[in-house]
Image: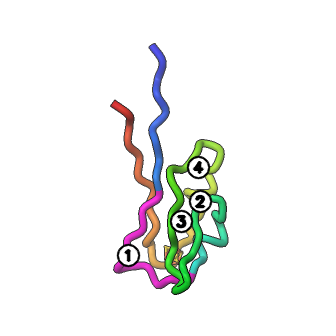
Amino acid sequence: MSQRQPRVALRVDWPQCTARGLCAELLPERIHVDPWGYPHVLGEVPPELLQRAREAAQACPRRALHLVEHRAS
Ligand code: SF4
């Protein structure tokens, strides 16, 4: 039986985010900023970007960026 990889997405805690865009600089493949500097997350995080997504979340000065895992049923 094969083990399915969890699907991982990035979530922003909007009340905590101060819109400085550090996360978008660290992970431009998956995070863009809107004209006001708020991050816009583009889809799920592929396995090859998972480590950098974790680093971007850890680097957020407001702890406003989170990785959320969910398994396909
Ligand atoms: S690094 Fe954190 S506070 Fe800064 S834009 Fe990204 S989510 Fe918001």
Label 3, label 2: how many angstroms apart (C-alpha)? 16 Å
Q: Classify the position of the C terminus by image quarter.
A: top left
Q: Position of residue 50 (x, y in %)?
A: 58, 49
Question: To which residue does mark 4 refer?
Answer: 50
Q: Between residue 70 and residue 61, name the one nearer to us.
A: 70
User: What residue type is disc 3 on?
Assistant: Gln
Q: Can you tell which of label 3 and label 1 is closer to the viewer?
A: 1
**Neighbours of disc 2 within 10 Å: few (<14), some (14-19), many (20+):** many
Q: Can you tell which of label 4 and label 3 is closer to the viewer?
A: 4
Q: Between residue 61 and residue 68, name the one nearer to us.
A: 68
Dot 3 or dot 1: first in sequence order is 1
User: What residue type is disc 4 on?
Assistant: Leu
Direction from residue 23 to residue 38 in the image, left or right: left
Dot 3 or dot 2: first in sequence order is 2
Secondary structure beneath disc 3?
helix
Label 2, label 4: how many angstroms apart (C-alpha)? 11 Å
Question: To which residue does mark 3 refer?
Answer: 58
Question: To which residue does mark 2 refer?
Answer: 30
Q: Residue at x 51, y 69 (%)?
A: 40
User: What residue type is disc 2 on?
Assistant: Arg
Q: Classify the position of the N terminus by image quarter.
A: top left
Question: To which residue does mark 1 refer?
Answer: 14
- Which quadrant would residue 66 be assigned to in this image? bottom left
